[in-house]
Amino acid sequence: MPFVNLTGQRNAYRDELEAAERAVLDSGCYIGGPEVKALEGELAAFCGDSPRGKVSAVTCGSGTEALTLALLALGVAPGDEVIVPDFTFIACAECVSMLGARPVFADIDPETLQILPGSAETLVGPKTRGIIAVDLFGQCAPYTELRRIADEHGLWIIEDAAQAFGATTGGQRACSFGDIAITSFYPSKPLGCYGDGGAVFTPNVQLAEKVRMLANHGSRERYLHESVGVNSRLDALQAAVLRVKLRHLEDELKVRRENARKYDEFFGSLNGGLNGNLNGAKIVPQKIAEGNTSTYAQYTVLAENRKAFIDKLDAAGIPHCIHYPMALHCQPCFAGASDTAGLNGTGMNAASLNGAANNATRASETVVSLPVCAFTDVDFILNKLRSVL
């Protein structure tokens, strides 16, 4: 049983996908062109308007490159500080560090696992330029409070919606909350292509134009380079695949949410943790904040006795992953790093040595993710769980 059933998905849409792929291959237009342009329009339309204006989408080579392009467009430079959540994939902190700026690690909410606004606000200093909020595991971060903090301190917000394309808060879709937002089309994402891919979203026309220029070697006009940029393009074949999958995304998200509901019901029925099979240790699903819908990029629980729980999953043949086994401030690439990487010899930012990251560390020790995609047989998994728990 795969953790993400991409084969099942391809089989479901095979005729549409093969027709779209064949059309691109026969066209001879493999970089840019009508498929990419059409996809960008469809992505922007799907997201809807932001309170700050009509959202534009610019595709690129990956979600990580989308983060780099967003930071470059916002003018992040050596010596700047950017607040990032301590519990997430490394990309947000990595991209900040690669530009010579300093990632400052904020703690997370122990139930929703999203960046904690109160922790982020305590880290704002004279060098702080902005906040990267990650829509972790598929639900949106607390943007109302983060926007208040950003406005009061003159900061920008990057919404990292790599796991949340299609999620909502108060009816507003992900990728429309930040000054700039990004997503990833890595194959296992809720909307994934057949390789790497990503996109940048912004209601700011000037920022959108700058991102597009930076992604094309800093050039708007061929062989005239206004800035030092990068080569980060989504190819037409991936765009064609994504256009097909985007047509089915809403239906897939409904199935993901129903699968998550079944898991919630199952774990809610365990009454304090497996009726003693794990010595009373609780298994609690990630909380979905009020007003949020999630894409359930992963279905994640917090298991007090993770090893015992994983042993049961292994015994039942149920695939699982740990997203993520280490808080970012504990990663070797940040511990003892130079000022260029933004950290001191303690392994944490100086601004983070105030007791922050306790929840992040706890989460890294207890999280377990279970299969939840639209082509996963969750009923089969639950029957297996019942047999071993």
Image (tube, rainbow, N blue to C red):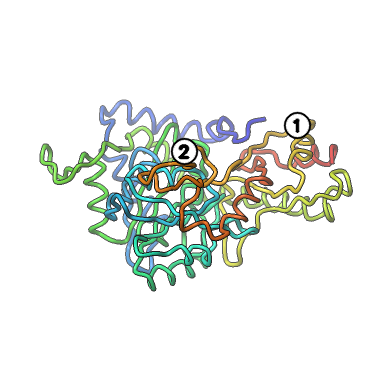
| Three-letter amino acid code of the residue under disc 1 | Asp
Which numbered mark, 1 or 2, is in the foreground of this view? Answer: 2
Write the residue at 27% across / 29% down: 27
Q: 363 or 56: which is nearer to us?
A: 363
**Badge 2: how crowded within 10 Å, few (<14), some, or many (20+)?**
few
Residue extending farthest to the left is 224
State which quadrant residue 246 falls in. top left
Write the residue at 42% across / 55% down: 46
Q: 209 or 218: which is nearer to us?
A: 218
Q: Is residue 290 above or below residue 283?
A: below
Q: CA distance from mark 1 to mark 2?
A: 31 Å
Residue 343: x, y in percent? Answer: 43, 47
Residue 108: x, y in percent? Answer: 57, 57
Query: Is residue 243 in view from this perspective?
Result: no
Q: Is residue 193 above or below residue 110?
A: above
Task: Please tell me the numbered disc located at residue 333.
Answer: 2
Task: Please tell me the numbered disc located at residue 66.
Answer: none
SS assignment at label 1: helix
Query: Is residue 289 in view from this perspective?
Result: yes
Which corner quadrant holds the C terminus?
A: top right
Residue placed under numbered mark 1 in the picture: 314
Q: Is residue 47 above or below residue 220?
A: below
Marked residue nearer the N-terminal end (1 or 2) = 1
Q: 268 or 97: which is nearer to us?
A: 97
Direction from residue 220 to residue 378 in the image, left or right: right
